[in-house]
Image: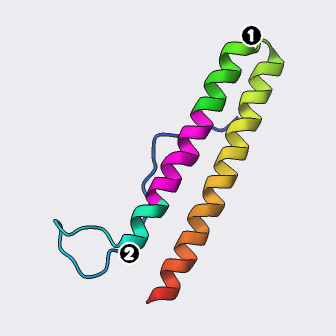
Amino acid sequence: MASHGMGSTACSVPNKGGGAGAEPHPLAKSPEAILKEIDSQYKRARDTLGRTLPVTEVKKRVLTMLADRHLQYRDNYVRELAALAGGEQ
């Protein structure tokens, strides 16, 4: 099975008109917050399932399916953001 890196919530949405210390574009704040919430929801679901399911192959499979579904949902969201960001240029 593939390892799923869940720590990254970075999103490359263009930051218009600023240097290193500039505030992010207002539209970039909301997507970053949404990505953090997506990750937070996944972590809560994973923790709940980890506590409630007995240690079995079923638990491993359920947690793997949850991780796969989370990554698919998150990746789709990031792709949509990238498409929107590409359309702004």
Q: Where is residue 44 shown, x and y percent of the image?
A: 60, 30
Q: Which mark is on residue 55?
A: 1
Residue lying furthest top: 54
Q: Position of residue 53 (x, y in %)?
A: 76, 15
Q: Is residue 21 above or below residue 9?
A: below
Figure check: 48 above or below 1: above
Q: Residue furthest bottom?
A: 89
Q: In the picture provided, is 87 more to the left or to the right than 55?
A: left
Report the residue at 57% width, 78% height from top: 83
For the magenta stretch, what is the residue range? 32-43
Residue 60: percent from left, percent from top: 75, 23
Mark found first going from the N terminus, 2 or 1: 2
Residue type at mark 1 is Val
Q: Residue at x 72, y 14 (%)?
A: 52
Residue 2 lies in the magenta-colored region: no
* Residue 4 visible, this angle: no
The residues bearing labels 2 and 1 have C-alpha atoms spaced at a distance of 44 Å
Residues packed near mark 1 inside 10 Å, few (<14), some (14 to 19) or many (20 plus): few
Residue 12 lies in quadrant: bottom left
